[in-house]
């Protein structure tokens, strides 16, 4: 298993306050990476030869355009694609957006824009439409990613708002995951696509493994919205380097189970011990948060000698 992708959470800050924000980003005045910390991250990425894609995200990373430019201008000795995830607020000023996008047209591999009912109070759809138009002119692919609950707008409503520009962008939509400040909706509002008892729950990171590095330089083993709300932090770049941290992931028994067998062995253990678990899920990552929000499940694995006896099923 090789890690090709890293998400850099440039900042915890955001200019929006979306109700469904999985990371609670809009509700904190938090940490932003400074140039020395960005340098440390990029040097570590430089050293991990398998990494060929960096996604810059947040919070809202374009609040710190100078730091994005620093990453875009970093000299790697190999091809490293750099994509940008944003709420698109900066598309409001067409000429400024055009100046930025055309300057970095050869360096930005994709612009991913979040937009749905929850972003509408903060971001005008015309800002996104401007970015899609300018990116298309500069041969940069875009995508719009939208989240939904029951009774909210429907996926087609966002396409309607994008108008003709929707033909020029990819579009992904997904249910809101109950995590972070997105946990506050009534339970019956969430769209649940999976059944833990009848569907096979697999880790969604295994097909294209990715890492997250947050503004505290903590490293997590995937880029799921829930991962920072778990205890699955695997290291910190102030204490160890990324090469060693990746080795820790690859030699971690819990991650090995997750990456190779999914949640089935853990579900068997829960059933054997008569432990209740959420049956209906928006995503397997919700189940990950259920198991690893604290260390209760690790204690069960330990008590059961799950990794040191033939009890593993
Ligand atoms: S724009 Fe993104 S990071 Fe900001 S509050 Fe909304 S969902 Fe959270
Ligand atoms: S299932 Fe867990 S480890 Fe896998 S992507 Fe989701 S949160 Fe990450």
Image: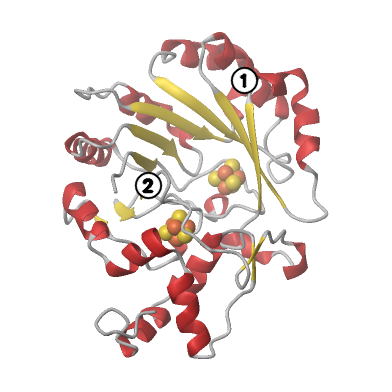
Q: Locate residue 97, reporting x and y percent.
A: 55, 17
**Residue highlighted by disc 1:** 132
Residue 109: image quadrant is: top left
- Which of discs 1 and 2 lies nearer the camera? The answer is 2
Q: Is residue 31 above or below residue 191?
A: above
Horizontal side, residue 120 vs residue 246: left or right: right
- Choose between 271 and 39: the one closer to the eye: 271
- Nearer-N-terminus badge (1/2): 1
Mark pair 1, 2: CA separation: 28 Å
x%, y% of residue 1? 29, 49
Number of numbered discs visible in the structure rendering: 2
Q: Quadrant of the C terminus?
A: bottom left
In the image, what residue occupies the spot 39% across and 49% down?
31
Q: Secondary structure at mark 1?
A: helix
> Looking at the picture, how far across and down is residue 24, in whole percent?
55, 56
Instruction: Please tell me whether mark 2 sits on a helix, a strand or a loop.
Output: loop
Q: Is residue 260 above or below residue 40?
A: below
Ligand 2 positioned in quadrant: bottom left
Residue 69 makes an appearance in the image: yes
Q: Would the CB of label 1 be found within 8 Å of ligand 1?
A: no
| The label number, if any, that marks residue 171 in the structure image | none
Report whether 125 appears left or right of 197.
right
- Residue displayed at 45% across by 48% down: 12
Q: What residue do we see at 28% from left, 69% from top?
A: 253
- Residue positioned 76% across, 40% down in the render: 155
Q: Which residue is mark 2?
A: 209
Q: Is residue 182 left or right of residue 149?
A: left
Q: Position of residue 297 (x, y in %)?
A: 41, 80
Residue 187 falls in image quadrant: bottom right
């Amino acid at each position: 298993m090789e890690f090709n992708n890293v998400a850099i959470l440039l900042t915890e800050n955001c200019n929006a306050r979306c109700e469904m924000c999985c990371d609670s980003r809009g509700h904190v005045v938090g940490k932003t990476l400074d140039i020395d910390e960005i340098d440390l991250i990029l040097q570590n990425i430089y050293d991990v030869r398998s990494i060929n894609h960096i996604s810059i995200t947040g919070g809202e990373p374009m609040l710190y355009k100078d730091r994005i430019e620093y990453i875009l201008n970093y000299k790697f000795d190999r091809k490293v694609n750099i994509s940008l995830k944003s709420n698109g607020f900066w598309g409001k000023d067409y000429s400024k957006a055009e100046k930025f996008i055309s300057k970095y047209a050869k360096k930005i591999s994709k612009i991913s824009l979040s937009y749905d009912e929850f972003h509408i109070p903060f971001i005008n759809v015309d800002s996104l439409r401007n970015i899609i138009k300018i990116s298309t002119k500069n041969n940069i692919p875009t995508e719009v990613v939208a989240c939904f609950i029951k009774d909210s707008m429907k996926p087609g409503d966002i396409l309607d708002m994008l108008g003709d520009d929707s033909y020029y962008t990819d579009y992904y939509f997904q249910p809101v995951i109950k995590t972070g400040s997105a946990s506050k909706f009534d339970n019956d509002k969430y769209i649940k696509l999976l059944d833990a008892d009848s569907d096979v729950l697999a880790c969604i990171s295994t097909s294209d493994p990715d890492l997250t590095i947050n503004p505290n330089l903590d490293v997590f083993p995937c880029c799921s919205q829930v991962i920072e709300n778990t205890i699955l932090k695997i290291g910190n770049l102030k204490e160890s380097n990324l090469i060693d941290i990746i080795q820790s992931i690859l030699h971690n028994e819990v991650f090995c189970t997750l990456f190779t067998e999914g949640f089935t062995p853990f579900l068997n253990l829960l059933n054997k011990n008569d432990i209740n678990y959420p049956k209906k899920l928006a995503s397997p990552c919700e189940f990950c948060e259920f198991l690893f929000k604290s260390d209760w499940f690790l204690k069960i694995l330990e008590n059961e000698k799950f990794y040191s006896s033939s009890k593993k099923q």
